[in-house]
Image: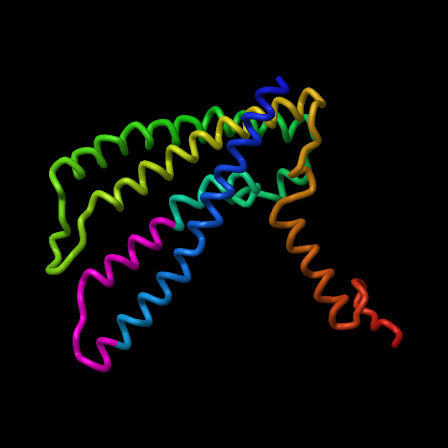
Amino acid sequence: MDSLIRFSRGIDALNTWIGRISAWAIMVAILVSALNALIRKAFGVSSNAWLELQWYLFGAVFMLCAAWTLANNEHIRIDIVSSRLSDRNRNVVEMIGHFLFLLPFAALLTYLSWPFFWNSYRSGEVSNSAGGLIIWPAKLLILAGFALLLVQWLSEVIKRVAVMQGRIADAHQAAGHQAAAEAEAERLLAATGHKSDGAAVES
């Protein structure tokens, strides 16, 4: 089991590294959008390639950061329910969700994305828009995103089993959107000089 835990940590590290790098595509997309707008206003010239590049960059963030999001327990969940479950029941719900929903979803989309990408690559598919970009890199992002999500699924299952066996602590036990919102509210109250019960802090 210890070797599987190390393997899981390696997967987490890989997806964290990919996610952090991919997140910078948001900044690049903003710069591309601004540059495209400036050129269009100043010279009356525009290109579909600029617009499609923005779509590619957004797609890179959405697809390549999905596994990183899962690794950090930031995916959408119903915190109001999960926060009220016992540790045992929460672990059972997590495992059911992983095997009944996430595994079939990630595996099927990875399987279907391969021919979707490969056929586009072999044919040299190009956008139908005038001046558009080649299509296969965007389809490769889809394949890569679901493949990374599938690998992260394996990491999450390994960690959940290790948690249930008491081998590692549950890093996300107190996590979740509700807990994060409450912590942020406490921080803002402290920063504005108020206690959490609404009374002003004595200066």
Q: Nearer the viewer, residue 57 or 187?
A: 57
Q: Which span is picked out in magenta?
A: 39-60
Can residue 161 be found in the magenta stretch? no
| Image height of 95 relative to 50, above or below | above
| Position of residue 154 in the picture relative to residue 132 (left or right) | right
| Image height of 136 relative to 1, above or below | below
Q: Quadrant of residue 84?
A: top right
Q: Nearer the viewer, residue 91 or 45?
A: 45
Residue depicted at 62% across the width and 17% down the height:
1
Residue 20: x and y in percent read 49, 49
| Image height of 23 relative to 170, above or below | below
Q: Quadrant of residue 105?
A: top left
Residue depicted at 33% across the width and 54% down the height:
57
Can residue 56 be found in the magenta stretch? yes
Count every numbered label the image shows and give the total.
0
Residue 115: x and y in percent read 21, 31
Residue 48: x and y in percent read 18, 62
As drawn, the residue found furthest toward the right would be: 202
| Image height of 114 relative to 46, above or below | above
- Main SS, magenta residues: helix
As drawn, the residue found furthest toward the top would be: 1
Residue depicted at 28% across the width and 77% down the height:
38
Q: Quadrant of residue 131?
A: bottom left
Q: Quadrant of the C terminus?
A: bottom right
Q: How is the image coloured?
A: rainbow
Residue 118: x and y in percent read 20, 33
